[in-house]
Image: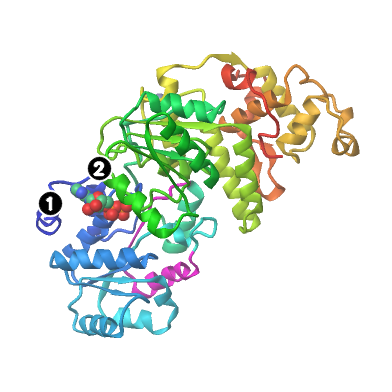
Amino acid sequence: MPTDLLRQVWGFDGFRPGQREIVDAVADGRDVLAIMPTGGGKSLCFQLPALMREGVTVVISPLIALMRDQVRALREAGVAAGALTSGNTQDETDAVFQALSQRELKMLYMAPERLAGGGTINLLRRAGVTAIAVDEAHCVSQWGHDFRPDYLRIGELKRALNVPLAAFTATADAETRAEIVTRLFDGAEPVTFLRGFDRPNIRLAFQPKDSPRKQLLTFSAARRGQSGIVYCASRARTETLADALNAEGHSAVAYHGGMEADLRRQVEARFQREDGLIVVATIAFGMGIDKPDIRWVLHADLPKSIEAYYQEIGRAGRDGDPAETLTLYGPDDIRLRRTQIDEGLAEGTRKSADHARLNALLGLAEATGCRRKRLLAYFGDELADDCGNCDICLHPPKLFDGTQAVRKALSAMLRTGEWFGAGHLIDILTGTTTEKVRERGHDHLPTFGVGRDFSKGQWQAVFRQMMGLDLCRPDPDRHGALHLTDAAHPILRGEIEVTLRHDTTLRAKGANVVRT
Ligand code: ADP
Ligand code: ZN
């Protein structure tokens, strides 16, 4: 029985949230797609069923080090597991082949590159493979950050072996999910689980960036002696903010990708060991960190996407005790993130997807209702009631009736054929005669100048919130031109009203916040 095995092989007392249902479905031989956050305990969900079933389960994973770790741990627990990766010695590989041909293996870990060789599929067929598990299944997505071309061969493997497949990932956005279904399951819907994304002990909060140094010091002063992480967008900033914290009597240290590997490891070890250390880091920090009692995470700069945000705040409060987060956002770092995407090496469609992920984060920053509901909704996880543990639930913001402003913006969008980004639309609304406005004759539109009562910065805040409310979306195929969603039409027809945030709209300053 699963729970007996759980105790005997892993020494665990029970399942984590979501694990049991996934284990049951995989053990039943269903096709399964399971989406669980990092650290949620995915590996157990394919390892345990593998022990319950006859024959070999093939596990495909892109991470050689991780495969080796898992194989070692399984062997120590007495499970016949082996790996075929480029990291093997010839002896290791021979031993695996030997064990396979004698049908002695329960689990075979394999790098996707192995599938490229024509012989592998035949070999697996002869070896009595009865199930396939795919770790990091999002690597099959050409939209994602970790695309691995050899993952595209997994569908073929499944067809050839005609066995059930269970795919696992922590990436939950709808496009990636759809792509996994198409490419790994030939489009036949697997049983899908999306669990464990809610981390109710983590408090969520956002603030417009005013003076990040001061905001950080105020925040940390109230949390003296607690372990925390400050995330910054640049290396230089990690040093400045670490100095500022030390000057206030905190114990803080900088960490970034430009530091020597030795020094980085020292910082990691110190953080793991010491109480109350603050690490001021670029995103390079945290991957391998498994410290349960990180009490807070502060983003001194806006993360690059809603996924990155979720991952980074998720490092706090692993022990389940209350943990706090604060994310600062301002026009400058929004612009920085846009530029990083635009100047990156990714191809056009990927860039648009990245802009959309950033937009989702901006929507969360500008939310007028419970942030956790919104965050979980993005991942497809549901929360029935407001959480009571985000800044909005705790201190509901002042709102104002933004219906008129939103209608003006939407009609500017419609009258220009939904062909333009926010920057140009704001020029039209504020009656700014740029060359582009004149060339297109947009200074003759009835909407030209109807929004002079707002500054450009205020309009940008309106557009951010409109995107956040999903009234309009940037079109990937039209360089981010905004188009109306179905939700916008009742507003244009005057059937429903829109509330916007007073604090972030009417006090907004700055320019070019929204992608044009
Ligand atoms: P993921 O692959 O989802 O990031 P892992 O499978 O590596 O996560 O599991 C994360 C950690 O949780 C591991 O240290 C694992 O041993 C532990 N873990 C998993 N399931 C359980 C459980 N049911 N009870 C206790 N610990 C668990
Ligand atoms: Zn809330």
Which disc number belongs to residue 427?
Answer: none
In the picture of the structure, the residue carrying the numbered disc 2 is 17
Relative depth, front residue between 113 and 238? 238
In the image, taking residue 485 as reference, residue 15 lies left or right, namely left
Q: Does the magenta stretch include residue 190?
A: no
Query: At 61% from the left edge and 29% from the top edge, which residue is drawn?
Result: 466
Relative depth, front residue between 163 and 287? 287
Can you give x and y, in whole percent of width and height, for residue 44 in the image?
Answer: 24, 56
Segment colored magenta: 148-173
In the picture of the structure, the residue carrying the numbered disc 1 is 3
Q: In which quarter of the image is residue 431?
A: top right
Q: From what the image shows, is residue 35 above or below residue 55?
A: above
Q: In which quarter of the image is the N terminus?
A: bottom left
Q: Look at the image and tell me whether residue 362 can be seen.
A: yes
Mark closest to the chain's N terminus, 1 or 2: 1
Relative depth, front residue between 213 and 339? 213
Q: Look at the image and tell me whether residue 34 can be seen.
A: no
Per the image, label 1 sits on a secondary structure element best described as helix
- Distance between the alpha carbons at the discs numbered 1 and 2: 14 Å
